[in-house]
Image (cartoon, rainbow, N blue to C red):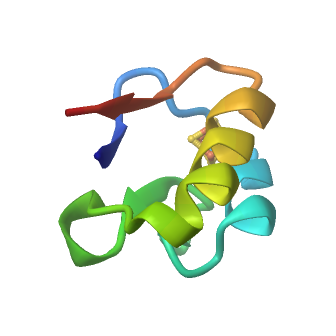
Amino acid sequence: MKLVVDAALCQGYGLCHDEAPDLLELDEFGYAGTISEGIVVPERMSAAEAAVGICPARALRLVD
Ligand code: SF4
């Protein structure tokens, strides 16, 4: 699975980074980007799902 950020929706709240700091990084304005092209290993799926779930802007999703 891959974690994808919709940059048009991201509002820079930064909550996703708290859930998965190894999967997401924040730029200087707090906007999220993925690390390692968003690839999520099975052991980190729960963290990725938590990040998706906590984003108030619904800017994150998991894709095959
Ligand atoms: S929680 Fe959502 S809105 Fe906030 S930085 Fe992460 S992706 Fe962007």
The structure residue drawn at horizontal position 49% and vertical position 55%, both measured from the top left corner, is 32
**Where on the image, by quarter, is ligand 1?**
top right
Q: Nearer the viewer, residue 51 or 27?
A: 51
Residue at image coords 38%, 68%: 41
Q: Is residue 10 above or below residue 14?
A: above
Give residue 17's quadrant in the image.
Answer: bottom right
Query: Is residue 31 among what the camera can see?
Result: yes
**14 sits to left or right of 29:** right
Residue 46 percent across, percent down from the top left: 67, 52
Residue 61 versus residue 20 in the image, above or below:
above
Q: Is residue 26 visible?
A: no
Count up the numbered dots: 0
Foreground of the two, 26 or 47 = 47
Residue at x 55%, y 81% (from the top left corner): 22
Q: Is residue 48 left or right of residue 13?
A: left
Where residue 7 appears, as percent x and y from the top left, is 35, 35
Image quadrant occupied by the C terminus: top left
Instruction: Name which residue lies at 39% across and 59% down.
Output: 33
Judged left or right of residue 22, residue 38 is left
Give the percent coordinates (x, y) of residue 39: 27, 63
- Decide if residue 48 is on the left or right side of residue 15: left
Q: Position of residue 37 (x, y in %)?
A: 19, 65
